[in-house]
Amino acid sequence: MLPGGAGAPSLPKPPLMSDVDDEIPEPAERTGDQPVVLVSNRGPVSYGVDGSAKRGTGGLVTALMGLASHRQSVWVASSLTEGDRAVAEEAGSAAIQIEAPTGGEFDVRLVNSDPEAYDGFYNVVANPMLWFIQHYLWDLSNAPYIRQGEIDAFDYGYKQVNKDLADAVVEEYDRHGEPVVMVHDYHFYLLPKMVREQRPGVFLHHFIHIPWTQPDSWRVLPRRIREEIFDGILSNDIIGFHTRSYRWNFMQCCRDLMGLEVDFDKGVVIARDGREVWVRAYPLPIDWRMTKRLAASEDTKHYEEELLRRRREFLIIRVDRADLSKNVLRGFAAFDLFLEQHPEFLERVTFVAQLIPSRTDVPEYAEYLEKIEALVAVVNHHHGTPDWMPIQLKLRDNLEEALAAYKHYDVLLVNAMFDGMNLVAKEGPLVNTRSGVSILSENTGAHEVLGEHAISVNPFDIQELADAFHRALTMSPFERDVRWKGLERIVHSTDPGEWIDAQLADIERKSSGQRPVAVPPPEPG
Ligand code: G6P
């Protein structure tokens, strides 16, 4: 059936993205004089063996690129490819200058680590150990088994890579005249202490993009390792999270696991050495201007045509990294149940799942991908017909193809078990043209800001999710429109520049000796 055919809700005609494009105002230019050193595992650029550069995408890179290109800055990141290693080798301790897509230039310093150390750092400790703890993913009766191999991966892998980047940070700190150091994510919990030991006066800010879980989930780690992690991260001056609830969990961990003094209202932890550490929440917005521009591009249009040619009356989509935390299997199980319970939707709806293979050297991830493919085959076999495949699985990383799907979905599924923020939940409604409905897990950071306009689901409740598909697909055009407009308005109302500004304002406040502003606790529920 063609889009908008019999039975499809009649929806207001969307504006053409190309028209909208002309009206997108540029953000206010943000400049500042304090230099910054940014630190993340995945940097803003990556090189092929032929030396060709590929710019990083994703919310974090885009958000930080804005900051980096508007002030004196250097971005310290790990070498991830052979090409990166060659470029880093040639540059020595010098930085490489790269151009930001929005104009301006900034320096990048790629750091080579010993490949075996990096393997332990990335494939054993960061993913899965810390990632699983921070998303409640361990099936504790089966895993993890912490043996000498895991301990060594921490002592000689995680620690070593943290040290490699810490040394580069110290060099850049000296070179740039006491910049603020802004560290990102769970890869570098030990780095702040290593930097502070060498440069006691440094201002360290650390943003954690994934959930912070409650104290008991951290008891998986041997006490010595756990304490090194907390001492490492508490060497920062400010620690930021996406939500008030992760911030709260972190403070509870400091109190319950480390016995530290915590002021929950002010968000202050007193570290073992007596320093005050501020714990704040800054929800990351998406760069809506750039997302809209890309959605209006010729490449995206090409994928739209392809999608529309195959489209049935209704389209459900999901776009995710193929990560266990994204809860892909329960999403397909719920779709299976929905088709079972509502056979009137057979042949009328397609579920397009675009999944980006991720961390495939970690056995748990490789197995997960196999399970996904097997379940898709079962559901398609169960309900499919010679000319209708209920689930279309696209295992690839293609931003324009994802944007094309965002523009035309009736239902966007984001059912992560736990997720730091989830930017898909924001990008989808921003560019959707059919007043599409969002089904959103209540355990995503995005839910704290978007929940009221989405259909909220408990990601473990498959019947609830099957019911949510039915509710979304039978929702009146009026309700769809009201909900979608609510989502779109929120996503539009802020940009990454403001996210950065809020962090810089706190840095300024703390370094000038002011008191922290009280933050309300998370909402119960
Ligand atoms: C999450 C993390 C990022 C990470 C990304 C992709 O969003 O917060 O730090 O870069 O996943 O994971 P990868 O292991 O491919 O870098």
Image (tube, helix red, strand yellow):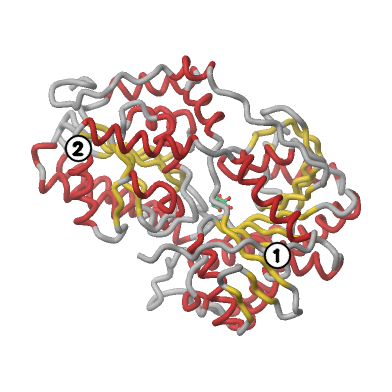
Callout count: 2
**Where is the N terminus found, in terms of image quarters?**
top left
Residue at 57% over, 65% down: 124
Instruction: Report the amino acid beneath label 2.
Output: Met
First along the sequence among labels 1 and 2: 2
In the figure, 373 relative to 98: above or below?
below
Residue at 86% over, 47% down: 92
Residue at 13% over, 26% down: 7
Q: Report helix, strand or loop for mark 1.
A: loop
- Is the C-beta of the residue carrying label 2 under 8 Å from the nearest atom of ligand 1? no
Look at discs 1 and 2 and give the one toward the viewer. Answer: 1
> Is residue 52 visible from the viewing direction of this image?
no
- Residue tagged by mark 1? 515
**Where is the C terminus found, in terms of image quarters?**
bottom left
Residue at 58% over, 24% down: 25
In the figure, 158 relative to 228: above or below?
above
Rounded to the nearest angstrom, the CA distance separating label 1 from label 2 is 48 Å
Q: Report helix, strand or loop for mark 2.
A: loop
- Is the C-beta of the residue carrying label 1 under 8 Å from the nearest atom of ligand 1? no
Q: Quadrant of residue 187?
A: bottom right
Q: Give the image location of residue 169, x and y in percent.
A: 81, 56
Which class describes the residues within 10 Å of circle 1: few (<14), some (14-19), or many (20+)?
Answer: few
Q: Give the image location of residue 268, x and y in percent.
A: 64, 70
Instruction: Report the amino acid beneath label 1.
Output: Arg
Front residue of 214 and 502: 502
- Residue tagged by mark 2? 475
Q: Give the image location of residue 477, x and y in percent.
A: 22, 30
* 398 horizontally vs 25: left or right: left
Q: Give the image location of residue 418, x and y in percent.
A: 42, 59
